[in-house]
Structure formats: C-alpha cells, structure tokens
Amino acid sequence: MIRSNRKSCILGPTFHSLLTGKIVKDPPLWTKKSQQIDSSAKTRKKEQLAYGSGRGPFGRKNGAATTADSGICATSVTIYGYKCEEHEVTTQDGFILNMQRIPEGRVGGNSTGGNKKQPVLIQHGVLVDGMTWLLNSPEQNLPMILADNGFDVWIANSRGTRFSRKHVSLDPSQPDFWNWSWDELVTYDLPAVFDFVFNQTGQKIHYIGHSQGTLIGLASFSEGHQAGKLKSAVFLSPIAYLSHMTTALGVVAAKAFVGEITTLLGIAEFNPKGKEVTVFLNSLCNYPGVDCYDLLNALTGNNCCLNLSTANIFLKNEPQSTATKNMVHFAQTVRDGVLAKYNYGRPDYNVMHYGEDTPPLYNISNIPHDLPIFMSYGGLDALSDVQDVQLLLDHLKFHDVGKLTVQYIKNYAHADFIMGISAKDIVYNQVVQFFKNHQ
C-alpha cells in the first residue's frame, strides 16, 4: 500500500533505548512531502521461514571462506551462469579498490534505458565487504535480481577489506595504511568508484547503500561530490544519527572507543579476527546486558528472516577489517549525537585539519531536493533505530514532493535487508520498480 503526502501512524512493539533509559514506541511515520510504503502487512510469519543466527564468540571462524586470490566473481557470481568482471579503481589518496561488475542477467536481461543498461552502484556497510550482497541464492540476492531486471550492476569494496588491501605506496602492515575514517570514504572512495563507473558507462548512476554505505552516501551527496553523475539513491537501514542505537554491544563499544584507543591497543587495523581485537571485543562481552553468544543479533537486532545456512556463510566470510580510527569516528557519532567529521580530540588539532576548533557538520539538508530517494528501515533494527531515522527524515522535510519514498518494515532488523529470505518480495522488488520509475 502506498500513501502520498499525508500523516500516518504505525505503532510497533515497544523497546528499551539503552542510551536514554526510556521506554519508547515507534513514533508516527513522518510522511510529509513523501511517498510511504507500509510493508508490515507483507512480512511473513516466523513459522513459515527458516531462521538463523550467528552464534559464537569473536575470532577466526572455521570453514571455507573466500580468499583474496579467488575473488568474488569466481566464487559467487560466474558459478551461477552470470557474466562478471573484476576491476580495480585507484583513489586520489592512493588506495586501490576492488570492484565487481555484473553487466547483464543470466539470459541477457532487458535493457532499462534504451540500448544501454542503466548502471547501479552497490555499497556495503562497515566490517563487511561486497560478498555480503551475494550470500543468498541468485533468486534472492539484490545484485543478481537487478542484473536479471536489465541493470548494469557494480559492487564496491571499501578500503581495508580483503579485496581492497592495496595502495600505490603503502602496505597493510604499516600504520599509515589505516590512517582514515569514513570521512575518507566520503572524500576519496565514493568519488573514485562513481567516476570509474560513470566513465565506463557514460550514464548517471543509481546508488544503493546499506548501513555505512548509506552514511557515506548521505554525507557525500550533501557535499555535492557526485553532482552530475547521480541519478537516484536507495538507502537500506540508513545510518546517519546513532544516538538511539539499541545494540548493547554497540553501546558498550562506543563508550570504549575513545581517541586513545589506537595507543591502548597498539594497532591501527581493527581486525575482528585478529588476536588483539578479539581480546578487546571479548572483554566487552563481559559487560552486564551484553550477550555475544548470538553475535549477529547482538550487533544488528533480532533479524526476523535469515536462513540459517546463509547466516553461517556470513560468519565464515565476515567480519572484515576496517581502520581503528573509523571505529573511533563511529563512536563519536554515537556519543555526540551529530553527523560531523572526525574529531581529533584537541582544538588545536582540529584547527590544523579544519581551520576551526570543532569538526564541521555534514548538512543532510543540502542533498539536492530533486534527487529521487528510496529509504527503507526496520522496526527491530538495533543500529538504524526508528528514532534516529525519524531525525534523518526531519532533515529531508523540504525534499520535493514525490521525490522521497519511505518504506517501514515493522519486523525487520539490520541484516534482514541484505540477507533476509523475504527481502526480494518486500524490499528488492520495490527497489527495482523505483529505479524503473526514475530512468
């Protein structure tokens, strides 16, 4: 059901906000000057699905996982009969990023934009890589569904993940290789992959981000980095404001990630499978209220619709490395309640980098008001909390009529959007139609 430009109230279950200590209900959905899709009626009953969770401690998992030598195309795409290309893109600050391209569906697909297929760039979240989009079957994963619907699909892999651990002059063993936060993903990574896809295809790009992928998209588009190359944007489990995050492990980690964390750990690379980080994370699991036995749900919320085998494959391949500085930046976002550039902890250091005492804010309201946006979020998401999404939507309240489509899924959590076995029917088909409506 689609409702346009009118108020609506969808009340979900109550939940406890760990940061505020208050019991809150899902607030009325903000729908002014937007289209809204209420998908709670479409979600399937739990008894009808095969559910799974990622249980177990931090550290290296047993079982086969994709290695850097084998590549995503060979292990997860071509084996299903799809064409797939491996590409490398160099950022202005020297990082060499790996990308995959699925140029067409298994039977060629139907072109969505005349003779040329319209490009779609898909960006993963933090502590994972592009493989996370491909864990379900071809009939259930987003990249292959898009390819089969006639789109030219490009999958990005952020710096530091296993397929993007190269630099023109630095090595991952050097601390300078890890001297970055999501600011650099906004300033360097996203512009580099956008430029590459645009130059390869000659067409404006549809963008899809999940989690951190939404954060860097929102921040980048607010600063006009992709002006002239962006056709539309899809944000799944949008992350911008994190003050109401309800994952107990995440809240404890945010308090632990202070500016001196790199010195305390003695590492610049935050590798959840590495010994030092494993010890650190396991120590967080001893905090009251933190349950790391069901690790995936502890981090992302009570995902309703994961297949057990998919969840197990996920934990064999993930989590991936990121920069410790990046985790500190996320912690600052949680603690400070604003979307700002990295805080160097001292006014004089901030002056050196920004010319002012405090880090500049990213102004989401600066995103072009005529940019077609599709945003989908879940009522049980422990990272992309309903209250924080409402704050994000408030910054988009002057978006042009008909250009903002909002979907609320009452029983979805963070991982359901990328691995849920019902995601095709509930989310992905809506995304495909959204792109077709904005050719």
Image (spheres, helix red, strand yellow):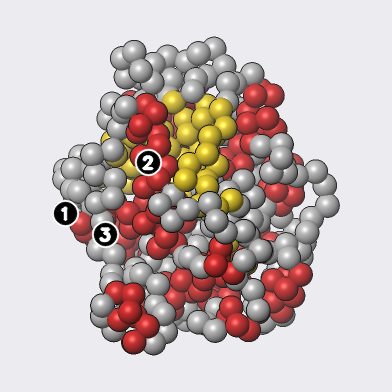
| Mark 2 residue element | helix
Instruction: Say which quadrant the N terminus sits in.
Output: top left
Q: Amino acid at mark 3?
A: Ile
| Mark 1 residue element | loop
Image location of residue 144, percent across then percent down: 54, 28
| The image quarter in which residue 80 lies | top right
Would you name the residue on which mark 3 appears?
364
Q: With respect to residue 53, does 281 lie above or below?
A: below
**First reached walking from the N terminus: tag 1 or tag 3:** 3
Q: Is residue 215 left or right of residue 285?
A: left
Instruction: Kindly identify which numbered label has been placed on residue 398.
Output: 1
Q: Amino acid at mark 1?
A: Phe
Image location of residue 347, percent across then percent down: 34, 87
- Which one is in front, 432 or 43? 432
Q: How many marks?
A: 3
Q: Residue at x 34, y 87 (%)?
A: 348
| Mark 3 residue element | helix
**First reached walking from the N terminus: tag 3 or tag 2:** 2
Image location of residue 237, percent across then percent down: 45, 52
Instruction: Kindly identify which numbered label has been placed on residue 275.
Output: none
Local packing at callout 2 (Cα closer than 10 Å; few below 14, some 14-19, many 20+) is many
Q: Is residue 208 visible?
A: no
Instruction: Kindly identify which numbered label has been placed on residue 194.
Output: 2
